[in-house]
Amino acid sequence: MQFSETVLKRRMVRNFTDAPVSDEDLRKILELALHAPSAGFSQGWSYVVVRDEERRREVGRIQGEEGYADRFGNFISKAPVNIVACTSDQVYHRRYQEPDKIKDDGTEIDWPTPYWFFDIGAAAMIIMLAAVDLGYAAAFTGTFDPKGMKQYLGIPDEYHPVGVISIGKPAKDVKSPSLKRGRRPQEQVVHFEKW
Ligand SMILES: Cc1cc2nc3c(=O)[nH]c(=O)nc-3n(C[C@H](O)[C@H](O)[C@H](O)COP(=O)(O)O)c2cc1C
């Protein structure tokens, strides 16, 4: 698939068939995610891949799946693969205390932006695009109960589960009402030379 076709084809699909994601495809998707950029090459991401049916149901429950069910059905637990995307600010703090990153006065940089969230977003985008490129669809849902998710999956203290990327073969889905907002055109979003 051409890159632009993959990008244009990607959208949040909130329904999946029962068809599995092959081990080989899952491995490819996760391998590509490792090529995301990261501040200071910190790579502070980690993933918990949930494929077991009962565990998917529990991940769906933690994600508040019942709140989506009326409109979209149980698309999170239905997806054959759920990737819980985590990030650790501590990895970045440690990295930026290394000699090539630490300031001359021996202190850590003043973070202009929490790069650990930027980086997991970039990696999540690769995961979603890779899934589409391989003929799957993906949906991202934010984790509003990070404590519950951590406890259930045994995620270490310093990692924060940002959200779940559900992947599977696309089934006929309901479009999110948010899409009625329409896509903002370049003229509104892009400023050349000066805002
Ligand atoms: C950071 C982020 C959080 C999101 N959280 C949710 C969510 O919790 N539940 C959900 O159904 N969709 C969620 N979405 C999907 C957006 O609603 C969706 O990307 C947007 O409506 C545009 O649609 P498209 O991705 O199909 O182009 C999220 C997307 C992003 C980038």
Image: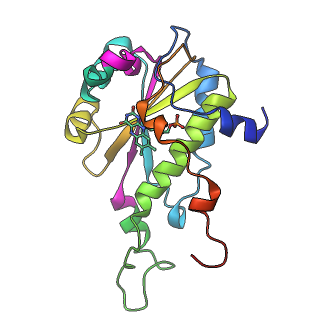
| Residue 36: x %, y % from top left | 59, 51
Residue sticking out furthest to the top: 18
* Residue 120, horizontal then vertical, whole percent: 46, 50
**Residue in front for this viewpoint, 140 or 45:** 140
Q: Residue at x 42, y 86 (%)?
A: 103
Where in the figure is residue 132, as x and y percent of width and height?
A: 64, 29
Viewer-closest of 98 and 178? 178
Image position of 74 (left or right of 136)? left
Q: Is residue 178 above or below residue 194?
A: above
Residue at horizontal 51 percent and vertical 25 percent from the top: 13
Q: Quadrant of ligand 1?
A: top left
Q: Is residue 55 visible?
A: no
Does 132 appear above or below 22?
below
Q: Is residue 16 visible?
A: yes
Residue at image x 54%, y 62%?
41
Magenta stretch in the rendered image:
69-91
Residue 79 in magenta stretch: yes
